[in-house]
Image (cartoon, helix red, strand yellow):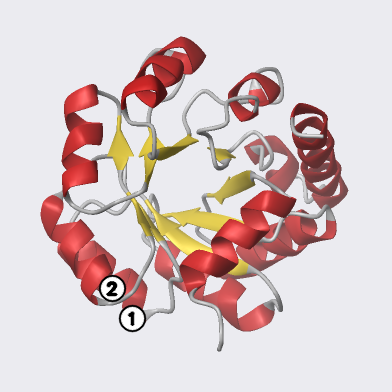
Amino acid sequence: MSKTMAQILESKFRAAPVVPLIEADDPAIAVKTAKALQAGGLDVIEVVLRTDAALDCMAAIIAETDGVVVGAGTILTVDDAKAAAARGAQFIVCPGLVDAVVHFCQENDLPVFPGTMTAGEVQRAHCLGLETVKFFPAKLAGGVPMLKALSSVFRKMRFMPTGGVSADNLGEFLALPSVIACGGSWMTPKAAIDAGDYDAITNLAREAIALASAARP
């Protein structure tokens, strides 16, 4: 029996619990960035819908890479989710928790990671049948201490901290058993992309994997 996308993601997160974010308005540059990340060992990528060409960039990565799981981030509405799914998004990430978006993804077997930062939001996600949520903005929302507190209450919930996660604190977040992966844009710095320095992106991906391995030997 073939694996579901949720199972594929879980397997990939066990190998490399880091999700780099790509913000791009040029599909060719988005593909080069994705390939640089993959060369560094990261093959789960979130393309954030923060430019007019974001969906084109996401679709290009899906079409021009092999073995990369590509999701759409910054999904704000059901229409956003529908548009991303129509272009091939393999998972959905939201900054907040919107029931209608969650229901659409559940009805279409599309993994969804809605953003939460309070106990009330996590409890609502739990009641919607979710087992994994985004914790956003992770640093401003209380960081590791807040996640420890939430995890003590919601013992079966897993979290994907994003927002303020960097090479400096990645290990602290990944040391928590309830954290399934961390997302961040520190591996795709604008300066390196503008300069065409894709080797730098590959090196940042490798560094992130090394930090993750140290946190989870």
Q: Tell me the crowding category of disc 2: few under 14, some 14 to 19, or many 20 or more residues within 10 angstroms, Cα based.
A: some
Count of numbered badges drawn on the protein? 2
Answer with the quarter of the image where residue 101 lies. bottom left
Left or right of residue 187, residue 7 in this image: left
Give the structural element (helix, strand or loop) at label 2.
helix
Question: Along the line of sight, which residue is nearer the eye, 55 or 38?
Answer: 38
Q: Position of residue 17 (x, y in %)?
A: 65, 45
* Left or right of 119 on screen, residue 28: right
Q: Is residue 140 above or below residue 54?
A: above
> Which residue is the site of mark 2?
83
Q: Residues within 10 Å of mark 1 (few under 14, many from 20)?
A: few
Q: Position of residue 120 (x, y in %)?
A: 16, 27
Disc on res. 101: none
Picture residue at 66% right of the left edge, 67% below the top: 31
Q: Which residue is mark 1?
A: 86
Q: Disc 2 vs disc 1: Cβ atoms closer than 8 Å?
A: yes
Q: What type is the residue that disc 1 sits on?
A: Ala
View extreme (left): residue: 100
Rendering quarter of residue 123: top left
Q: Nearer the viewer, residue 198 or 195?
A: 198
Q: Position of residue 203 (x, y in %)?
A: 86, 42
Residue 115 rendering spot, x and y as whole percentages: 31, 39
Q: Nearer the viewer, residue 185 or 189?
A: 185
Secondary structure under tag 1 reads helix
> What amino acid is labelled 2 in the image?
Ala
Q: Is residue 146 above or below residue 1?
A: above
Q: Is residue 101 left or right of residue 9?
A: left
What residue is drawn where x is 25% and y is 68%? 106
Picture residue at 45% right of the left edge, 17% below the top: 148
Where 192 falls versus 173 (above or below)?
A: below
Direction from residue 174 to residue 200 in the image, left or right = right
